[in-house]
Amino acid sequence: MSEKKTLTYLLYGSHEALNEEEYITEEYQYIVPKEDVEEMVVLGGRYLMIYNEGVKIIDELLKDADYYEAQERLEEAGYEYKEADEYEEPLDVVVWSEDIGACLLSECETHPSYQWWDGSNWRREWPEDATEVVVEETPVNLDTCDERGNWRFRRQWQHGKLYTVLTIDGEPTDGEYLLVISSDYQGSHDVARLVDSEERLALYKEGEVLLSTAEAAEVLGISERRVRALCAEGRMGRQVGTTWVITVEDIEANRVRKPGRPARSE
């Protein structure tokens, strides 16, 4: 059996709103694909990046120089350099400042960072205390079609997907799902939160999602063979071609009741 294809996301912080009209509350977190996050060095001052030379030589060449004198000396010596940005990738080049002298940029402390477009400008985020969530690659689409033919989740221009979670911060988990909400509004940021099995079923009902026999068996806690038998008996589901599809209402009607006497009527 081939391994399941997965996606890795980072959840961090809280999110006030997707846009001015949104209702998203603090229970949602920012979500970003881990592959979009890169380690960056925050320089926080005036630095020069010098190429094709070693730390000791640059330290000696620029000893006791101020920022502008350093540039003059580098130009006279024929070195390739540039003024560093506020943050840089940890490259194998020499970085120099008046305060610390020269060092390798690749040996500086890095912090996770990523960029996103807010509708007008590129913004750089620095996620802290992020939760790493690995999910199955293919989500369940929670959008429904409204009377105008628009696909939406809860409101126009908004979309919802539900992923099955495999691990949280490297620890295997079961019965956890990731609700991801995105918006068509330019400048919005995707948000997400973890939900349990019961809320998953409520979201399926809201999104009019049809379950497979395997999914129904998982929810009901019975074998898939038993689910197929219930379908064949007409107690749940409908057949589409050779496949059975099952509604959340079918699931609710066939929940196994706990053993014991029925409640006494008043």
Image (tube, rainbow, N blue to C red):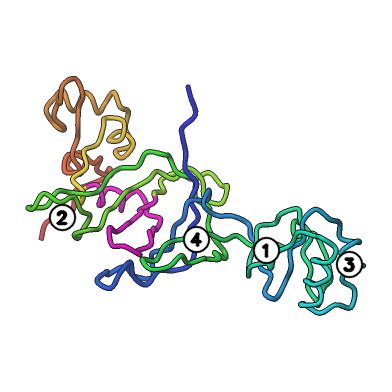
Question: Which one is nearer the viewer's eye here, 133 or 227?
Answer: 133
Q: Reading the chain from its start, which is encountered first: label 1 or label 3?
A: 1
Question: Which one is nearer the viewer's eye here, 133 or 251?
Answer: 133
Which residue lies under the disc numbered 1?
A: 41
Residue 59: which numbered mark, if any? 3
Q: Reading the chain from its start, which is encountered first: label 3 or label 2?
A: 3
Q: Amino acid at mark 3?
A: Asp
Which residue lies under the disc numbered 2?
A: 264
What residue span does the magenta drawing correspond to? 178-204
Residue 222 shown left or right of residue 79 in the figure: left
In the rendering, at what x and y percent does residue 76 appear? Answer: 83, 66
The residue mark sitting in front, 3 or 4, is 3
Q: CA distance from mark 3 to mark 4?
A: 33 Å
Residue 115: which numbered mark, if any? 4
In the rendering, at what x and y percent does residue 143 appear? Answer: 22, 49
Q: CA distance from mark 4 to mark 1?
A: 15 Å
The residue mark sitting in front, 1 or 2, is 1
Q: Is residue 181 above or below residue 68?
A: above
Q: Is residue 136 above or below residue 238?
A: below
Question: Judging from the image, what secondary structure is the residue with disc 1 in?
Answer: strand
Q: CA distance from mark 3 to mark 2?
A: 88 Å
Q: Reading the chain from its start, which is encountered first: label 1 or label 2?
A: 1
Q: Amino acid at mark 4?
A: Gln
Q: Residue lying furthest top in this view?
A: 242
In the rendering, at what x and y percent does residue 219 appear? Answer: 31, 40
Residue 169 shown left or right of residue 206 in the figure: right
